[in-house]
Amino acid sequence: MSTSNVLLALLESGPAHGYTLKRMYDERFAQRRPLAFGQVYSSLARFERNGLAELVEVELGDGPDRKLYRITPGGVQVVSDWVFAAQEPDVFATSTLFARVSVALLTGRDPHEVLDAQRATHLERMRVLQAERRKAEGSDLLAVTYELAHLDADLKWIEQAGQRVTEGLTS
Amino acid sequence: MTGFIEAADVSLTYGRTTALQGCSLSIDQGERVAMMGPSGSGKSSLLHCLAGVLTPTSGSVALDGHRLETLSDAERSRLRLSRMGVVFQFGDLVPELTLLENVMLPAQLLRMRTRDARSRAMELLDRLGVAAVADHRAGGVAGGQAQRAAVARALVHRPQVVLADEPTGSLDTVNAEIVLDALVDLSVECEAALLVVTHDHQVASHLDRMVTMRDGRVMVTSGV
């Protein structure tokens, strides 16, 4: 995920301070990894430098200055381009799991043991997600079902891989 | 034998075809188990043996200590009717009856008062989001609605064992979630042992434990 494009997009709903942006990001997109303040402020500085956002006002206080940023038309265009550009599907072509199963095969270890352990771990995570899904709403529901669907796809591959290994990897 | 419902060393052959070979499976009261495996691995055969619909060639199936193979057909049917609820992939409702009449059927066969049966059936149809079509004939409603009614019918008499064979196999993801959430919730309320046969890991992830079958054998169990 492009964190900086998401931060820029969050400015579209109205001018915001860095702190507010971080909070909005963490609520909707962070899932298990909250954003560092440093990344928010460095992104905002870069947006300003590149003409994607502009400084509206600076509040002086006891601590650091509070800067309010607004997105520019150029920034809105960058968000649009990013939202509608289809991703290259090759991001899904490799995975650590695939590498571990391949190494098990290459080195004479039991690939079924690798697959069985991963199946159990995936299912355990899916059980947690199913419980979360039942309470989730809005973008949280989308996030939970996104993760469930991807774990489900992994499990389909785990079953296929197990079957193919058993059959001697012939097509 | 220790589980509430269990198969002990069950084998089943049809002519020269072996469907099950030495299968053992035990499910406690209140436990929720998924059974997965490739097509033809024996999942449905084992479920039908547990339901007492098929009689194993060898081995034993017991429900709360009653060994099914020692019972007469009438006794087995009575036990199934009073203690079990069964859901199939396509609901298998009586198409000429309304959803409400379908759901009331097991309760009425068990001689529950009509008023109580109707009230319980309507409560379940309401919880499953199909009360508005309760008076529609089963043959005329959408697949998702019929399947929700099938879950209500399986649970109307508060069974101690619920067996479901691909209960969401014909449904889209959202309808499948509704049906499964209801199946699990109602089974929890009845403290029933729940066994769900499925191809779908998302379905399995609603349940506490998974049993995998291959070539007529119970291979792996994993879970909590």
Image (cartoon, helix red, strand yellow):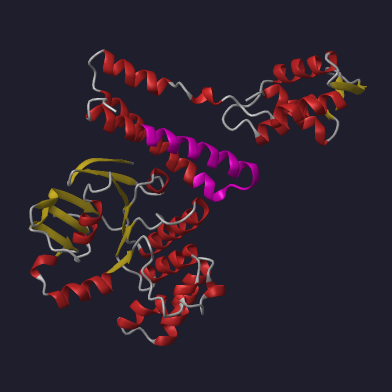
> Which residue is located at x 16 percent, y 49 percent?
B24
Please state the extent of the stretch shown in magenta in the rendering.
Answer: A131-157
Q: In the figure, residue A11 lies in which quadrant? A: top right
Residue at far bottom of view: B114
> Which residue is located at x 76 percent, y 30 percent?
A80
Q: Position of residue B191 (x, y in %)?
A: 34, 61
Q: Position of residue A126 (x, y in %)?
A: 44, 40
Residue A3 visible in this rendered orientation of the protein: yes
Residue A150 or residue B13, whichever sits in front: B13
Residue B92 is a magenta residue: no
Q: Position of residue A107 (x, y in %)?
A: 26, 13
Q: How many marks?
A: 0
Residue B184 or residue A155, whichever sits in front: A155
Q: In the figure, residue A164 lies in which quadrant? A: top left
- The quadrant of the picture occupied by the N terminus of chain A is top right
Q: In the figure, residue A79 lies in which quadrant? A: top right
Residue at far front of view: A171
